[in-house]
């Protein structure tokens, strides 16, 4: 029985790979890659000729058996399109299957976009929460953000350029005007880290159309904020509406008392 190596690969600059990762990719019997074309660019640069098979979201069920059979014969390396496998990509299914079968799983640490963005953002790094990709639907996105709006931890998420404006709007509406860093194309030729408030970020994106993949790093809830729990907000809203207040008036009054943004409170009425 072989071992499954979870190998971190560059998120942009091909020089960001460890000597250990290169040795493992050279020595295993098979590489399971989320994107075989990206894998071939990396492997060709370092003259590595290990066989490669695709393993991505669309074929993971079909390929799972193949990779597990390969593990029965020798070591296999799992690599994602970029960064650490298993972080917002289909690698989790293979890792889970290997653990279930008591196959040794060995991490080979490497680059990761969310930790790279975190240390470049200039926001607190002592506590952070990685949210992956937020939901595409605005209502689901808002619900996810309401669940973490009280946290003092720095928040991190990924976003595609064509959804960035909508996501910034939801962030601003739910979280208020917090500080944010827009980290674009990290370690690549057009790397950029833009810093400012969420209101400024929305204007920035309106002025300059987004390009490339983004990692968003958002400040946690202010220490001084004394926000009510959502249940208390809903109870206060219901009481005001029951006493004849309009939705708008009730939202405005409860927002002033609760520390929640008025637009978020209004959505709860």
Image (cartoon, grey):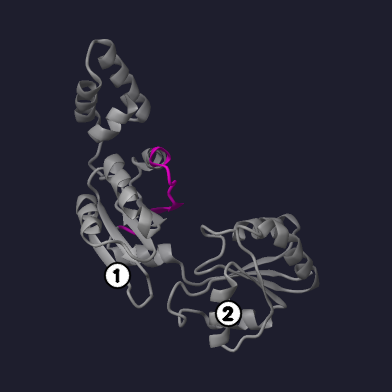
The residue depicted at 34 percent of the width and 57 percent of the height is 216
Residue 138 is one of the magenta-drawn residues: yes
Residue 192: quarter of image? bottom left
Quadrant where the C terminus is found in the figure: top left
Q: Nearer the viewer, residue 223 or 71?
A: 71
Dot 2 alpha-carbon crowd within 10 angstroms: few under 14, some 14 to 19, many 20 or more: some
**Circle 1: element type:** strand
The residue depicted at 22 percent of the width and 24 percent of the height is 248
Query: Residue 185, image x and y in percent?
Result: 37, 69
**Circle 2: element type:** helix
- Does residue 216 lie above or below 260 as drawn? below
The residue depicted at 47 percent of the width and 71 percent of the height is 111
Give the residue number, with chain letter if any, for mark 1.
192
- Does residue 185 lie above or below 139 as drawn? below
- Image check: 253 left or right of 264? left
Residue 132 is one of the magenta-drawn residues: yes
| Residue 259 visible from this viewpoint | no
Quadrant where the N terminus is found in the figure: bottom right
Query: Residue 175, image x and y in percent?
Result: 29, 43
Dot 1 alpha-carbon crowd within 10 angstroms: few under 14, some 14 to 19, many 20 or more: some
Residue 5: quarter of image? bottom right
Boundaries of the magenta span = 124-140
State the mark number for residue 40.
Answer: 2
The residue depicted at 40 percent of the width and 42 percent of the height is 141
């Amino acid at each position: 029985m072989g071992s499954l190596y979870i190998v971190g690969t560059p998120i942009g600059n091909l020089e960001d790979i460890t000597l250990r990762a290169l040795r493992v990719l050279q020595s295993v019997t098979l590489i399971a890659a989320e994107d075989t074309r990206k894998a071939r660019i990396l492997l060709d640069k370092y003259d590595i000729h290990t066989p490669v098979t695709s393993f991505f979201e669309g074929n993971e069920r079909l390929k799972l058996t193949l990779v597990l059979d390969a593990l029965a014969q020798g070591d296999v390396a799992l690599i994602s399109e970029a960064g650490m496998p298993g972080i917002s990509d289909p690698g989790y299914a293979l890792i889970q299957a290997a653990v279930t079968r008591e196959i040794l799983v060995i991490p080979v640490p490497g680059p990761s976009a969310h930790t790279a963005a975190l240390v470049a953002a200039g926001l607190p790094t002592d506590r952070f929460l990685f949210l992956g990709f937020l939901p595409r639907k605005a209502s689901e996105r808002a619900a996810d953000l309401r669940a973490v709006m009280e946290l003092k931890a720095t928040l991190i998420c990924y976003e595609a350029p064509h959804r960035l404006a909508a996501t910034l709007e939801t962030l601003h509406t739910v979280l208020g005007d917090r500080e944010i860093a827009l980290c674009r194309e990290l370690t690549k030729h057009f790397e950029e880290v833009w810093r400012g408030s969420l209101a400024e970020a929305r204007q920035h994106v309106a002025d300059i159309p987004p390009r490339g993949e983004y990692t968003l790093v958002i400040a946690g809830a202010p220490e001084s904020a004394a926000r009510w729990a959502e249940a208390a907000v809903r109870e206060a809203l219901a009481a005001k509406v029951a006493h004849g207040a309009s939705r708008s008036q009730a939202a405005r009054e409860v927002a002033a008392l609760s520390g929640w943004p008025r637009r978020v409170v209004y959505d709860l009425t």
